[in-house]
Amino acid sequence: MAETMVVPMDYVVLKLKIEKGFPYMKSDEWKSWVLVYSPIMLKAILPIEMFRNWISFVDACHQLVKPSITFSDIDDGHKFLQEFCTECQHIYTPTILTCNMHLHLHLCKTICDFGPVYRYWLFGFEQYNGLLKNVNTNRKDSFEVTYMNSFVQDTFKAQPSTSKNAITFPQRPFRLSAFIQAYSNPSLPVLGNESLPPSAFPLHIEPPSAISDVDYPHLLDYYKVAYCMPNLEGYQHPSSPFSFVDNQIIKLKSINLLGQVYKGCKYASGCSSFVQSLFLGSQGNNRLAYTGQIQYLFLHSFTPPVNNTELQTRVVYQDKHVFAFVKWFQIEHDCSRELESVDICSADFIACDFECILPVHRISSVVATCNYKTSTNNKKILVNALPHKQYN
């Protein structure tokens, strides 16, 4: 299963088996093991009581290792660490419990004093507990600090580009709160022309091209639904130069959204092409996280007819829309992985429709996937949603 794992670009692929011991593992390798691999790999290895206990620790890491976190995240992370440490006292012998585990319960205060641990400290991944690693508390480097050099890079400066392979265009002022709402609240209308974070620019582009005849109907249907304009026409035989959707697009090589990089499946062996997005359920009152694979990212220009009264009231209209064309997996109604928050999906994509046109603003998280066979030898995909990475 580990060998079939598709790991996002920001996580290290583990190449040595953990049975060889842990001394070789660095902070980023521990991070991958804890967040990406262990929820999937340990399910069939640990007794259920130990596995539940370990997942409490994984859940805490999900909350606390993000570059930008809320006070609610801190409270949730502390609660999970309390559950983890308390349960360890009942499961394991006292000799396993080290002073490092006591430090877990002080992380919440440290974060409140100094900010997210992602900015200044990753050693926690190397010292987590004596269950998996025999920590020598006398080592001189037992409180080593890992400085996040990449954090000091200015990801928010959008410099004008003169390259034919990059593009920058004016847009309305970026608001972080609106961007977060776009991917976390599926009931909000998101068109795809909303402001992108400055980290996205310049956009690295391919030469302009025509969208395929197979995909174009989905783009047309998307605009009909998103703009509530069912009379929009295809480009082949428009009755008016202002009432049709053009088939010309500009594909993007990648896009950087607040430090999280997304790519189409043909780049980087598919890494960072598997994503999740939230959709409203059939009743309209519940949220469903669907997993899919980005086939390609693209920029498309569209201006609705000027007789649309709502748009006439706008001072400036942004015609450039940024989309991901995503093929979605069918969610399996299997709750056997619910404890570790791992989804089980069909290995085949569902039929494409207008919902394959996804504004990049609605990408809620990047995911790791691996192949999985059921007891009846049916092929499935395990999906592990990872913490949403955003620098602010």
Image (spheres, rainbow, N blue to C red):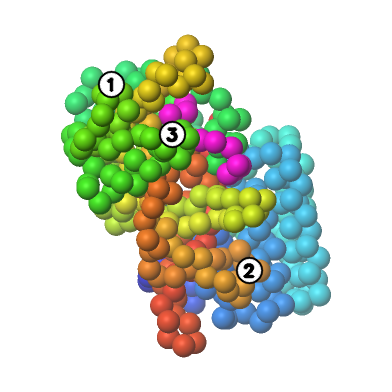
Crowdedness near tag 2: few (<14), some (14–19) or many (≥20) residues, C-alpha within 10 Å: few
Which SS class for mark 3? loop
- When asked about the image quadrant of residue 68, the answer is top right
Give the residue number, with chain letter if any, for mark 2.
338
Vertical comparison of 164 with 183: above or below: above
Instruction: Point out residue 74 in the picture as x, y percentages from the top left corner.
Output: 72, 45
Instruction: Point out residue 50 in the picture as x, y percentages from the top left corner.
Output: 69, 75
Q: Are marks 3 and 2 in contact (CB under 8 Å)?
A: no
Q: Residue furthest front?
A: 239
Which of the pair 258/274 is nearer the observer? Answer: 274
Identified at 42% across, 86% down, the residue is 377
Residue segment shown in magenta: 184-195
Nearer mark to the viewer, of 3 and 2: 3
Give the residue number, with chain letter if any, for mark 1.
161
Please state, as top left, top right, bottom left or bottom right, where the N terminus lies in the image: bottom left
Give the residue number, with chain letter if any, for mark 3.
229
Crowdedness near tag 1: few (<14), some (14–19) or many (≥20) residues, C-alpha within 10 Å: some
